[in-house]
Image: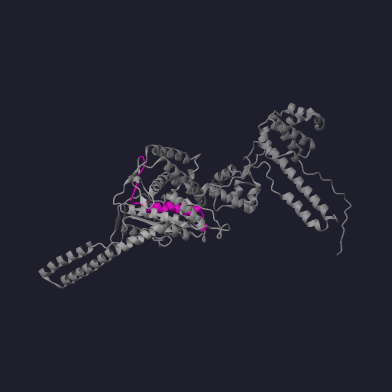
Amino acid sequence: MTVVQIFNDQPEPIRQDPHDLHAEQVVLGSVMIEPRALADVRTLVSAQSFYRPAHALIWEAITGLADNGLPFDAVAVGAELGRDLTRIGGAPYLVDLMQRVPSAANAGYYAQLVRDAAFRRRVVETGTRLFQLGHDPDAGANLQSLVTAEIAAMTAVQVQGWPEPIPLSAVAELPPFPVEVLPDWMGEYAARLAEQTQTPVDLAGCLSLVVLAVAASGKVRLQAPTWKEALCLYVLMALPPGSRKSEVYAAMTAPIKAFEDELRAEAEPIITEAAMNRRIADVDAEKAEREALSATGVERDALKDVAVQKALEAQAIHVPAEPSLFTGNVTIEALSSIMAAQGGRYAVLSPEGEIFDIAAGQYSGSRRPNFGILKSGFTGEAVRVNRVTRKGEDIAHATLTLGICTQPSVLEGLGTIPEFQGQGLLGRILFSLPPSLFGTRRYRDAEPVPEHHTALYTANLSALIRTLHQFTESPLIPFDAEATEGVYDLLEANELRLHPDTGDLAHMTDWGAKIVGSILRISALLHLAEHTDHGTLLHTWQNPITARTLANAREIGDYFAKHAQAAYDAMGADPTVGDARAVLKWINTTSASRFTSRDVQRGNQHRFKKVARIEPALALLEAHGWIRKLPAPASSGRGRPAAITYEVHPEAHAS
């Protein structure tokens, strides 16, 4: 290889390291004039930021006094410097620093200049060391690692002055389902089933409430202080495929399925006889119709009356539907018909969440959301189902229970359908987002559920559903005096959570406004389970609900509130949070370290049509520590004020 050396007779000018002495002087003078400026300035610079050693000494004296709660005016700083006072130019220099300050209000702007100059010096120093390494024959095999170390030190995240950024998620860590507040026979079985199947306890815990609702809804109601509640629940759990959901569903619903089989066996001969009678009556009616059609004159009129009577008799024969307590997935139209045939009470229990896709119109030609029965079935309202091609169906008191497990990604899809939230469907759902146990499941060590726990769970749930199924009226369960006061306490506490400025549920009032009712329903379900023992529903279930039971239900409600916040967060229900995430994504994509709102708008014109739309998102990011406003430069008083520039937290590029 030929090396060509090019010689230049002109000497290279000596370059000083980047610095801004005037900015350093203004920063030091400003904090001595206005002590309040130190808090803002200190987040931007340190002693190492100053180019002139004398300025670093003054800064250390100022911050040392401030840390001890002492004043740091020029006199105090001079005294603190002691013998070093002569090194910095004496007391007159401290006075000179203050005289150089145009306005202490601009201290932050000048601190930014000092910090930028300090960073440039680091770049120069790193470049110099890299140059020296390239010419060092002793570097040898270590050259690459030495260069990598220098570059890593140069590009390391500098978080001086930055607080730890707060995640935009509503809840950083979600709590597990509190199975300990369930009645012993149910909580113990749920916990042990979770251990046997190596599934999150949330799944079995939530299904415990669901099966209680299947047993009680439409048969018992709750008497709240000034209103009544049906005892059905809508519970949506999100777990990824392969989580063994079906196994947990089968175990938790086994007593319900067994009772359903009993009902079907009992009803089979009745249904068969009624169907036979109806077919015979239909044949008789058709025969009478043919005879009337073939007759003439007076005879025809007489036979017509007979045919009409036969048709009415046939229609009067009711063929009962096969008893059904729950199903997996079903269309909305079919659900309405099934509920009408089953006396108005029903449940959809499925380890997959297709019911919400169906409700959103995925399988209909119009694709218009259709979930009227889901809304009415939650409150126990009367429902009239009008049909074009057949007779309409009336349901006096529709009560529907949902226990659905779906994939976490489906939550985002729910948030894209405005009607789900706008018409109150999302607000009726109790969400559970358990952590995935993939990679941590211990199959070899998993202990099976002891037989006596399975037997007790089966006996108690069977007794509860069998006894309540016989009720022809819907008795009311009230609260005792202490629990009633607890209900009012709960209402008052929840109202604070809905406050538009300070409430943690303010962005999801559709859900927050209904959580109290759900907690009260849960208290009634726990009450029924507490009064079921050794295969018998005790007569004491008619006693009022106690404050202890309400407290247990409230703990479960707190669980669902935290999970609902996370679910709404995943669905993007809070538009400001969604916009803030979009800005963070833009920051990450562009590697922006500083920007204006106009920069964001230009890069996201499809989302932000106007700059004003970005402001709430920027305010949220600033409040969470992801960005901060840079001090504005001193204004000349002419023209339009400079746009606000934001600086990005270094960790934002790794988020």
Q: As rendered, which of 417 and 117 lies closer to the eye?
A: 417
Q: Between 561 and 15, which is closer to the camera in this rendering?
A: 561
Quadrant that contains the N terminus: bottom right
Residue 10 at least partly seen: yes
Residue 269 % position (x, y):
28, 65
Q: Decide which of 247, 241 is in the foreground and name it.
A: 247
Q: Is residue 393 above or below residue 224?
A: below
322 left or right of 591 in image: left
Question: In the rendered structure, does residue 224 fall within the stretch colored magenta?
Answer: yes
Residue 415 can be seen, yes or no: no
Q: Residue furthest right?
A: 9
Pick out the residue farthest to the left: 298
Q: Is residue 347 magenta-colored?
A: no
As drawn, 108 above or below 327: above
What residue range appears in magenta?
A: 197-225
Q: Position of residue 64 (x, y in %)?
A: 72, 33
Residue 436, given in percent of the width and then of the height, sits at: 54, 56
